[in-house]
Amino acid sequence: MKSIVVGFLRQFIVGVAALVALTAVVGGAYPAAVWAFSRIDSNSAEGAQITDRAGCSIGSRLLGVDQKAPAGTPDPYLHTRVDGGVDEPMAPGDPNASGPSNLGPNSETLVAIVDARRAAIAAREHVDPAQVPADAVTGSGSGLDPDISPAYAELQAPRIAHATGLPVARVRAIIADDVTGRQLGFLGEPTVNVADVNSALGLVAHGCG
């Protein structure tokens, strides 16, 4: 009987010790380590929010939300990559959903969509279709890419200047200030963040209300 009690107490102590140790590691040390790691880039961890001078959130650098001017009014916005089809080529990505078209390079449907997008963008920017950059007419894998190429941003500068009344040189300077180079100096391509530029242009609604 005594040996049974001793054995039970030994197993009980071992179980309690294991519970305490696992609680400390899984419930304390691990979450603390994950939180500390997230602080390396705390801005991204908090959604990379863009704030106005009052500290109010006015958007996120991580989501390509394409703003639209009211019908019949000048279009002052820097636009993201389009995600629409042949019937509506200028449709932006839906910030509430994410997903690619899954159309391959040999798809005739994709060719038709790209041609429709190129024609629509050329008409909007008053340029020859051949001047429209590739990223402008090809949707991103998520449909929510917040970045565009400097070439696509530069293409839109004259229209933005005309709509806002700013000198073209000023618009181009704002775009140039936002250009991010290749990762590690050799990965990817230089990009321009659409939300950052629109905010710098004063085109994003401010205020916490």
Image: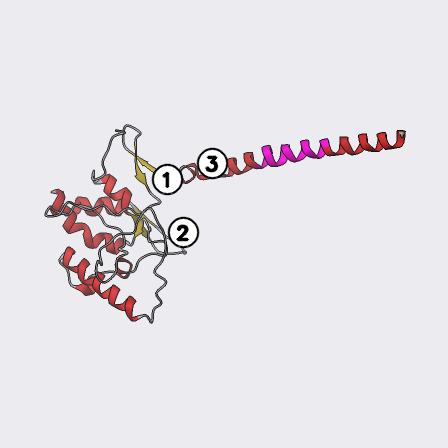
First reached walking from the N terminus: tag 3 or tag 1 = 3
The N terminus - image quarter? top right
Cα distance in 3D space between marks 2 and 3: 20 Å
Check disc 3 and give the amino acid type.
Arg
Of badges 2 and 3, nearer the viewer stands: 3
Q: Are marks 3 and 1 in contact (CB under 8 Å)?
A: no
On the image, the x and y values in percent for residue 3 come to 89, 32
- The residue beneath circle 2 is 183
**Residue type for callout 2:** Gln
Residue 23 belongs to the span the image colors magenta: yes
Q: Residue 42 location, x and y as percent?
A: 43, 36
Residue depicted at 27% across the width and 68% down the height: 111
Taking the view exactly as shown, the residue that stands out farthest to the front is 1
**Label at residue 48:** 1
The local crowd at label 3, few if under 14, some if 14 to 19, many if 20 or more residues have their Cα within 10 Å, is: few
- Residue 60: image location, x then y, percent: 33, 41
Residue range corresponding to the magenta coloring: 16-30
Q: Looking at the image, what colour scheme do you see?
A: secondary structure
Query: Which residue is at 55% across, 34% downward?
Result: 32
